[in-house]
Amino acid sequence: MNGELMSREISEIPQVFSRLLKDTQTFKNAGELLRGQDLSSVLILARGTSDNAAHFLKYLIETQLGLPVGLTSPSSVTIYDTKLRFKNVLVVALSQSGQSPDLVAYADAAVAAGATLVSITNDVHSPLARVAHLHIDLLAGPELAVAASKSYAAELLAAYLLVSAWQNVPSGVDEIVAAAEDVLKDNIDELVAQCTLRHEIVILGRGFSYPNAREAALKIQETCKVSVQGLSTADYLHGPISALTSETQVLILAPHHIPDASMKDATDRIRSSGARIFWLGLGGMSAPGELRIPGANVQNEIIASIVDAIILQRFALKLCVQNGLDPDSPVGLSKVTLTR
């Protein structure tokens, strides 16, 4: 049955969340480690799906801690043999497998250059886990479908728990398991039925929903074999909107409590083109005739964005199956990508 593996792994996300919430000692240790360092900047090391989670962690650290955060260029080490100077720098390595040679090489070089390294992987015995000063296990269990789902959701929650521990404040995510269980029951059949792979699909987010826009686009590309754009609404206005037509399908991610003003300009421009607009989440201002999938009803935008990722994974899965494709084993992809 097409999509059986991916469907099962998405359904496991509430249990993965529960396991992460119970791993309090790991996050306590992480908070103590980071508060004990004189850190001036942060770099995040990741590829693929984990790179989308990296954008979420980047935004969390910048908004909650006010530190500058960048994304690494592993080829600076693996191809150009750069000598790093990383005094007072935190490097966070995000990877489902923790095995990609370029990530491991960069992590080794960062530690040698004086960085503090925290790794977040789904394998406590992975090379990235072994080289880190502290490792956070995603506790997602084996993920067999090629398209990552539960490991991405786990990375989002782990990122939030890490930053909360760093701040030494309660995470306030007690409701997240129940919220995840609720969105697994949401009916998204009408959204799937109204979308076609014959016309352009654009997925837009802003702030904490921007990483989900990137990840949803990636999931549809991986499983449905079509090109999809995943952008911030701000970036979309800086050029890509010129390709918008009346046949474009635009999915706007608007988690609960997102500031309405953050998306108004883009939404107004998209509507004026006659493009088809769909909404995911309880935020934003939809117009009559625009289909909305409610999303998570939780206390803040950050938690809502974590939970709403589940709906996007279900959307990619169902869209793929509707078109007769198998999301578990997309042609041309493997579960672990070993880049150098």
Image (cartoon, rainbow, N blue to C red):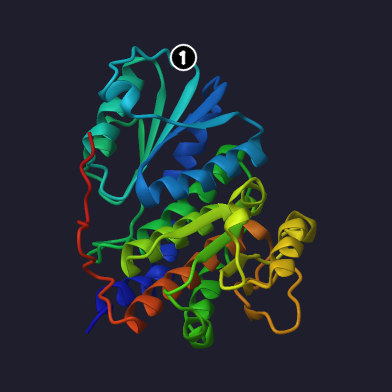
Q: Nearer the viewer, residue 85 or 191?
A: 191
- Residue 263 at what x, y percent from top left? 72, 58
Residue 269 relative to residue 317: left or right? right
Question: Which quadrant of the figure contains the C terminus?
Answer: top left
- Identify the image quadrant of residue 281: bottom right
214 shown above or below 34: below
Q: Is residue 158 visible?
A: yes
- Residue 20 at what x, y percent from top left? 42, 57
* Dot 1: element: loop
Residue at x 37%, y 72% (from the top left corner): 10
280 shown above or below 173: below
- Residue 142 at what x, y percent from top left? 23, 62
Q: Nearer the viewer, residue 253 or 42?
A: 253
166 shown above or below 75: below
Residue at x 49%, y 67% (from the top left corner): 200
Looking at the rendered structure, the kind of residue marked 1 is: Lys
Residue, disc 1: 87
- Residue 81 at what x, y percent from top left? 28, 16
- Identify the image quadrant of residue 246: bottom right
Residue at x 71%, y 58% (from the top left corner): 266
80 shown above or below 175: above
Q: Is residue 137 visible?
A: no
